[in-house]
Amino acid sequence: MATLKVKIQEDVILNNQDYGSKRVLEIESITSIVKRVVNIGTAEIGLLGFGADYNTELSKSYLSGQFDEDLVRYIRITNLDTTNHIALVLRNENNDEFGVKVDKGCSFLYCADLAGGVKDTMDSSNSAGGITPNSFGDLVDITCVADTAACDVEVFVASA
């Protein structure tokens, strides 16, 4: 087992004032790492899948793999392209979806429940106040599509 250290750091000096910041999250008991670079085209495709052991979700095909929902602790998806953005769509067990644009060179982080994986970690709502602490569903999958041309995307998943 290993400890994953996730470091987020901003370095900026504006008007001779240092506004930099550094945060470190240590995630213990990591036993598995998957790091892949995949090419994403302009048609939506499955990027990552999650499900319980022996669950039917684990039989689907995903470019970067399928993972046990109880064990995932950290996900990073980085758009390696220098021109185009990608769109990620996250879906939970209730078929709730939300999308996020990841611009060229940018990353999207999904920090799972550090004790329970991606179970009960995702929800969406069309109205303010529609999400409550008990409304989260299990993350089922993440799909991806490139904007106007194919993009290389780096995927990093750490599991217990």
Image (cartoon, helix red, strand yellow):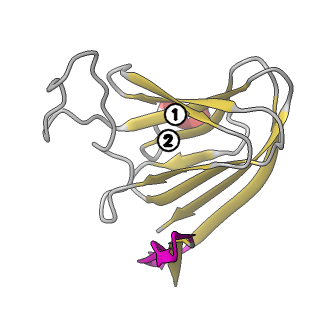
Q: Is residue 22 magenta?
A: yes
**Stretch of the chain drawn in magenta:** 12-31
Q: Is residue 25 left or right of residue 123?
A: right
Mark 1 and mark 2 in contact (Cβ < 8 Å)?
A: yes
The residue that mark 2 highlights is 50
> What residue is at 39 percent from the left and 55 percent from the top?
112
Nearer to the camera, 58 or 63? 63
Query: x, y (%) of residue 140?
Result: 45, 34
Query: x, y (%) of residue 133?
Result: 14, 41
Magenta span: predominant SS is strand
Nearer to the camera, 125 or 160? 125
The residue that mark 1 highlights is 141
Q: Does residue 4 sit above or below 88 in this rendering?
A: below
Nearer to the camera, 138 or 13? 13
In front of the other: label 2 or label 1? 1
Q: Is residue 79 left or right of residue 139?
A: right
Q: Quadrant of residue 104?
A: top right
Give, as a three-letter code, the residue at label 2.
Phe
Query: x, y (%) of residue 20?
Result: 48, 74
Q: Is residue 149 left or right of residue 15?
A: right
